[in-house]
Amino acid sequence: MKKLLCLALGLTFVAGVASAADLKEGDVAPDFTLQGSDGKTYKLSDFKDKSAVVVAWFPKAFTGGCTAECKNMKAEGAALQQYEVAYFTASVDDADYNKKFSESLGLDYPILSDPTKKTAEAYGILNPKGVSSRVTFYVGKDGRILYIDKAVKTGSHGADIAKKLGELGVPKKS
């Protein structure tokens, strides 16, 4: 009986992840309301018809790859700010932890916190370790997913985002 219950729970978990992980270009991005490291609350729907949105999910604050990724996004801020885009990094770490991480790096953009893991689940990126996978979502002004980057290079991610925004036709600020 125990084995059957474990099997049933396992299949339920896999089925749930598979449906969320099936997000693709053109799909409406799941809305979210998340606290930023700057103390503000951000809702994806607040950006609809105003600007594109980039959310770069990372596994864990204060780790090597995540530090490199966040530092590179800060270093490439001028290139990113040329576009009509709101950009964030995000993790399932709590808001206080992400605030400390942001302050330690002197970031000039917010890190979004998803401690309930509901948004990470909705985007299909919560991995079996209970942290988000390193995936970046590009969302258009219309709220639809423009691109999903599952092959993030932490040391060049800021420049890669700026390049992709141009390729996707996201308008530059006038």
Image (spheres, rainbow, N blue to C red):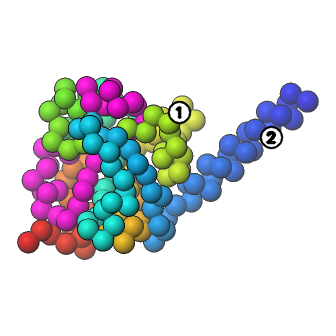
Residue behind mark 2: 8
What secondary structure is marked by label 2? helix
Q: Residues within 10 Å of mark 1 (few under 14, many from 20)?
A: few
Residue drawn at the location 34% of the way across and 40% of the way down: 35
- As rendered, which of 51 and 172 lies closer to the eye? 51
Residue 53 location, quadrant: bottom left
Q: Position of residue 45 (x, y in %)?
A: 38, 61
| Type of the residue with mark 2 | Ala
| Left or right for 171, reference 151 | left
Q: Is residue 168 at all visible to an observer of this figure? A: no
Residue positioned 49% across, 68% down in the render: 27
Q: Name the image quarter holding the N terminus.
A: top right
Residue 42 marker: none
Residue at disc 1, secondary structure = loop
Q: Position of residue 43 (x, y in %)?
A: 36, 53
Q: Residues within 10 Å of mark 2 (few under 14, many from 20)?
A: few
Along the horizontal axis of the image, is 164 left or right of 123? left
Asked which quadrant contains residue 163, the reply is bottom left
The residue shown at (19%, 72%) is 171
Please tell me which residue is depicted at 52% across the width and 61% down the height of the picture. Answer: 23
Quarter of the image that includes the C terminus = bottom left
Tell me the residue that label 1 is attached to: 130
Work out whether residue 171 or residue 49 is closer to the camera in this orientation and state it. 49
User: Please, is residue 143 above or below residue 76 in the view?
Assistant: below
- Picture quadrant of residue 164: bottom left
Percent of width and height locating residue 24: 49, 64
Residue 114 appears anywhere in the view: yes
How far is the residue under mark 1 from the one under mark 2? Answer: 20 Å
Q: Give the residues in magenta.
A: 73-100
Taking 148 as reference, is 68 left or right? left
